[in-house]
Amino acid sequence: MTVLEPPPTREQQQAQLTEAYRHCAAIAAEHGKSYHLATRLLTADRRPAVHALYAAARVADDLVDHPGADPERDLGDWSRAVLAELEAGWSGDPVRLALVHTYRRYAIPVEHLVDFLAAMTSDLTIAGYDSLDALDRYMWGSASVIGLQVLPVLGTAPGVLREEAAPHAIALGEAFQLTNFLRDVAEDVDRGRVYLPADLMAAHGVTREQLAEKRHDARFEALMREMVAIVRRRYDDAAPGTPLLAPESRDCVRAATDLYGGILTEIERADYRVLDRRVSVSKPRRLAVFARRLTAAQLARVKVTMAKPKSRSSTGA
């Protein structure tokens, strides 16, 4: 006879949830150093949710990029589990538990998660994209919806509707991912995937074989120069959205933008040589960006606190 375990108490649930968010923060700290540093500029109530969104994306992505014996089954099992748990409101897996709690707390549409999982699934079978338009359609699920997931957590300024900020959040998510694509050309081609548009590659005379052989030349440099310009325009499209965010969230976004945009600068400084090395923003540079934004973030929190109306006591005093 099967003996059913009693459901966890409220105290046990809170302890599990706290540990789940702590687990997600550790994943963010290990794998997304620039991203994690920027999140330290967020208010303490917002930070765990952003860590949960990052960790869930990382776990799903790793099921594709560092697959086991049956990645399609593993990703399918993970996807079905998280969607069922989102409906149920609880999970025994720490990353999925934090994600479920974040989705429900901020009323994030489940369609964003479905679209993200569909994009991850496509990585198992699709090895490249014919054009920037085709790549954009892929990035709807892999990047655009990430921006839309984070937006409710960051919040918008008083009087600003979320729909007004959404196009800029989408553009920023795409800019971040395109930046990663340019930095990680060599790693991606080793996994059998190329995220540089095939028509632009052909226009510059660059082939998949050249990427696989890690051959840097003037043609590849010209391709990368054009791609960097494309990505910078995405950052430009995203920029007007920052003032639409809650004041206490803006400096986190500004720091993340400075740090990820800094990767493009490092690619340029390396003469676009990303096939035989992995460029990155140095730790001193990351800390300098954080320090520059820290004071502004603290001032924003003070201003928001001072602007909140003081609650009146029950005696009316």
Image (spheres, helix red, strand yellow):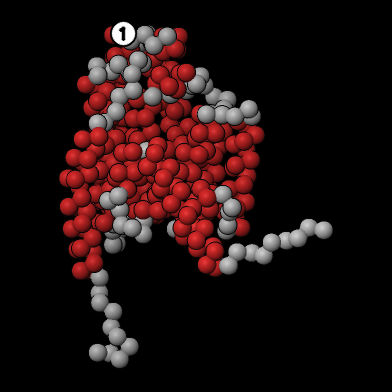
Q: Nearer the viewer, residue 295 or 23?
A: 23
Q: Nearer the viewer, residue 177 or 28?
A: 28
Above/below status of 33 relative to 293? above
Q: Residue shown at 29%/35% (left/top)?
A: 260
Q: Quadrant of residue 266?
A: top left
Q: Residue shown at 47%/18% (left/top)?
A: 190
Residue 233 percent across, percent down from the top left: 28, 32
Q: Secondary structure at mark 1?
A: loop
- Look at label 1 and name its amino acid: Asp
Above/below status of 277 relative to 310? above
Q: Is residue 72 visible?
A: yes
Q: Quadrant of residue 309?
A: bottom left
Residue 141 percent across, percent down from the top left: 48, 38
Other-residue count near label 1 (Cα within 10 Å), few / some / many at <14 / 14–19 / ≥20: few
- Is residue 179 rendered to the left or right of residue 258? right
Q: Residue shown at 33%/38% (left/top)?
A: 33
Q: Nearer the viewer, residue 216 or 25?
A: 25
Residue assigned mark 1: 217
